[in-house]
Amino acid sequence: MSQAIINNENDYKLARSKLQQEKQSSQSQQPQPNSIPTIASQESGSSSSVSQPTRDSEPQTIAVPQRQYLGDVSNQYITVEDQQSSTQSQTIQTNLIKRKQPLGVSQQQQQQQPQQQHLLHKIPKSIPIASDTIANLAVPARIPQKRQATESSTNLVEKLKIPDAVAADNVDNINKKTRLIDYEWQDLDEDELDDPLMASEYANDIFTYFADLESRMLPDPQYLYKQKHLKPKMRSILVDWLVEMHLKFRLLPETLFLAINIMDRFMSIEIVQIDKLQLLATASLFIAAKYEEVFSPSIKNYAYFTDGAYVEEEILQAEKYVLTILNFDLNYPNPMNFLRRISKADEYDVQSRTLGKYLLEITIIDHKFIGMKPSLCCASAMYLARLIMEKTPVWNGNLIHYSGGYRLLDLKPCVELIFQYLISPVEHDEFFKKYATKKFMKASILCRSWAKKFYAEGKSLMYESKSTHRISMEQ
């Protein structure tokens, strides 16, 4: 009697005991030669049946339930005894594979399944494909590359096949733009590309934005004459006191410029009583210090500096009211930013820059400069500083470019106002004392003595003979 090979190793002992019982029962009877037990396993998914011999030599069918998820794991009887050993090893390997794959999918079945290839999958070399077939393959076109920045406008017109009339109009527009820049200048930002703190690659965009913003953030130049209670003399006293408090707290120059801008913009909108002017100035400096400083002074210091005129709660209430009226818009293009920008064209000369700070601060102290753009005031201050230092040329192409494009005719009104302030008697004592110290190279004393001497000689402020649109006078 043939031996049975079991697919499931766990049922091997049970099947063996059954076979021994059948062997003992069959010894009492004469077995027929043609009665060989077989199992018909149907792998098509239907229920399989097992045929076993009985005493009447008639096969008896036993229904075996189907295992849908694990596939066909029914017992199989093989009649050929020569292939028992090889078949047994193959069956054990098959059972191990099925244990590892709970879904009943073998590695061979996975290999037989057609894999979905990518559209750009490499075609095997062993398969011969005609050239016409390759040409008709659905392969996407090559992605167009970006045009290089060095490509000229003429080549662009040729590639796009722009009509001659449209191309001529574009060329005329380009020529109009280039005609506006009729001076020579150097790209000084290129030397600072390696310094991330300078952000030289964004400098042009930043100052273009500042130029658009400064016109919107200017106060009303006529607000002192529109309010009945205010006079220019009152503002001068108030600003001089604000400079003193700013100096005591050792704040940045940007803080003072922003504080005066907040104060002027507020008075351009709201009517302020005389007894509230000092409170407005205190709240303006308090707001500006929070915006510009790293370590802002405590509110107790502001209340102490007012000599008890206002308490802390009043300053806080004034702060809220001022910010509400200004719609919390403190995005003021500070004049110090323009001064640092133009100092690059002046080779960062310390003396010229210190004198420029003093002359620039005059433009926020005197009420005559209310409504002037900060960039224009910076360019005028640098022009006078170079004129005092007797630099040649006083104004060149680089200074024109890095000041925002201001020429001598553009600077003339502001320069004359600054010069008029220098030759006039001292009006702001605290401001004069501040720049009369060694820390600021005694800029106030130097500029006033030069202005009086220059005025006595009757010279012209606008030195056209010492100014050029080139980089230097030698060219």
Image (cartoon, rainbow, N blue to C red):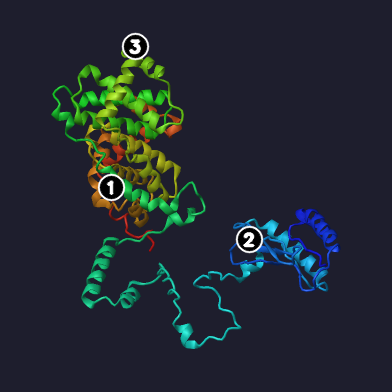
- Circle 3 packing at 10 Å, graded few (<14), some (14-19), many (20+), is few
Q: Residue at x 37, y 49 (%)?
A: 206
Mark 3 — residue?
Answer: 308
- Image quarter where the C terminus lies is bottom left
- Look at the numbered disc 2 and give the secondary structure of its residue: loop
Query: What type is the residue that disc 2 sits on?
Result: Gly
Between 62 and 149, the one lying in front of the other is 62
Mark 2 — residue?
Answer: 71
Mark 3 vs 1, N-terminal side: 1
- Circle 2 packing at 10 Å, graded few (<14), some (14-19), many (20+), is some
Cα–Cα gap, marks 3 and 2: 95 Å
Mark 1 — residue?
Answer: 212
Disc 2 versus disc 1: nearer the observer: 2
Position of residue 437 measured from the top left corner of the image (x, y, whole percent): 42, 29
Between 420 and 177, the one lying in front of the other is 177
Q: Is residue 303 above or below residue 254?
A: above
User: Residue 282 occupies which quadrant of the picture?
Assistant: top left
Q: Is residue 225 left or right of residue 291?
A: left
Mark 3 vs 2, N-terminal side: 2
Q: Residue at x 27, y 24 (%)?
A: 321
